[in-house]
Image (spheres, grey):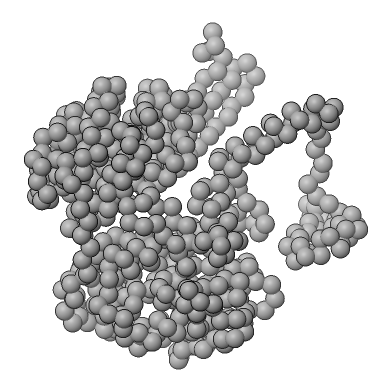
Amino acid sequence: MSSTITHTAWSCTISSYTSVEYLLIQSVALLCDDGSHVEYETGNPVVQLSCTTTCGWNDTTATSTARGWMGAVRLLASGNGVLHITPQQESWLEAANLTLMPILTQGKTEPVFEGAVLDFVERLEKQLTTTDSPYLTGKSLQLCDACVAQVTVATLVMLGMKQVPPRVFAWLQTTLQQLDKVLPYASIPGWRMFGLHKRNIWKDWCEAVQQGPASSAVVPAGDATLAPVKTTTTTEAPAPAPAATAASSSTFEDKDNAILKKLQEHSIEYEVYGHTLCITAEELVSNVPVPDATHSHTKNLFLRDKKHGHFLVTVHPDSHVNTKELGNQLGLKGKTNLRMADAAILDAKLHVKPGSVGPLCMALADLSLDDKERVTLVLDQALLDCAVIHTHPLRNDASVKITPDQLKAFLSKIGVEPVVLEFGKASGKAPAGGGAKPKPAAAPKKQQEGAIVESNKKSNKKGETLLALQWKKSENFPMWYSDVIVLSEMISYYDISGCYILRPWSYKMWELVQNWFNIQIEKLGVENAYFPMFVSKDRLEKEKDHVEGFAPEVAWVTKSGDGDLAKP
């Protein structure tokens, strides 16, 4: 009887049954006992899972949706009391999503990507060794084990890499064997990636892990065997690229790269080379060393201020950016509140993903926008004092070598006049506000269009889970706190100033606080009540001494329908 009163229907859009996202979502759905109810619609590049619950008793319907394979996994797990996802498990899912999924879904088989995969495998080995557990986050298999193991072994097989450390080997074997045991392969039709059509992928992958010789060499693509091997780390400097011009580069090719096309179009001399995929400036400095002190990578920070617009700040990796003083250095009038812009704004303004930012991105910025919408480039004088600058061309597995003069020439030709500032080193103090005046570089247009400031990112050390915290609590508490609540996915910024989206983690905290507090006040005989969210101007002005500091942030409602309110 109960099954007819409440009905739950799952639907999901996917690109195809051969996508890795489909395999992950369907396997998690089966593990959560919802797999037989998910209706898939292929041909849509955007993965979106919807859950619609209908109550026959009162004819009400509630729908929950989630985008991306990670959002789908969260939604599927939200109603499962056993296979829930903890913050630690979430961090492993995010690490696999950022490191391995781009390589896997885009079919990146070039040797340069093997370093990123080996790095990730070393993180797994360290986690399993440190916790002395056969599983990633506890004493039993969890959804993150299933997802991360599938993505890891699929990437290794695609690249033809046989070597995995002992604990990773045992973990993959255990996880795949259990998947083979509990999941009916017939429920996952259409899986044809990696030549596994009409074959049980769990069994095949499990056999691949078991059958390889204990050799330290990477096998050619096509040999899908994996074998345990001792963990080793090799970091090599990129081989010096032969002299290259805008017309050619013998060390790296990306014919469709918009930045390289722009450099060629404007006859700018440069060299480009591929390297290990690096998310942060610190990883770049550590894993891709430059020849000497006259060369420098860049550190980039994309900031926004609701009154003054957007700023791309590019600095020397050793420089320190004080966002509180930056507004004064830039000569911004009035109150400034420079804070990190999210990935969506970065993509909309510069058409680049986090981790791949650099001053060359300004070639894709819209220079016709007004001051509040335009991106201003800010450059570090210490960076311009170097002989050669290494910066990303829209991707974080490659870097462009360019001289400061050629960089200035390129910016001038695309109509961008950067603001040049002097930043103190990270170990010292940044120049006091007003102590350094902007020094625009020569350019034909009077347009402060790009501001490059490298972020003071405090990245994880090699082998640790990437959490992407960019600030230390002791150095800049406000920015550290913003990093924590945004990167932990507790809140998201909203398009209305002062309003934020409470995401599931933070809303759960709020519910727990409410539940505890309600019990306590009920013991005292106190009852809850709701009050209007709006306050009249008269009421607010009675408390003007208390709200004086917040006055610039107050949003006033002055209209109701087609008419004006008598009192705002």
Residue 224 in the image: state x and y as whole percent: 13, 41
Q: Which residue lies at the image location 40% right of the left edge and 46% below the top edge?
A: 94
Q: Which residue lies at the image location 60% right of the left edge and 75% below the top edge?
A: 325
Q: Is residue 208 visible?
A: yes
Residue 38 in the image: state x and y as whole percent: 40, 27
Q: Is residue 361 above or below residue 537?
A: below
Q: Which residue lies at the image location 50% right of the left edge and 79% below the top edge?
A: 424
Q: Is residue 451 visible?
A: no
Residue 422 in the image: state x and y as whole percent: 50, 83
The mark tally for this picture is 0
Quarter occupied by the N terminus = top right
Q: Nearer the viewer, residue 132 or 205?
A: 132
Along the horizontal axis of the image, is 322 left or right of 274?
Answer: right
Quarter occupied by the C terminus = bottom right
Kindly give the residue lying farthest to the top in the view shown: 1
Residue 461 in the image: state x and y as whole percent: 36, 57
Along the horizontal axis of the image, is 324 left or right of 237?
Answer: right
> Quadrant of residue 520 in the image?
top right
Along the horizontal axis of the image, is 136 left or right of 58?
Answer: left
Q: Is residue 398 above or below residue 108?
A: below
Q: Is residue 408 above or below residue 482?
A: below
> Quadrant of residue 250 in the image?
bottom left
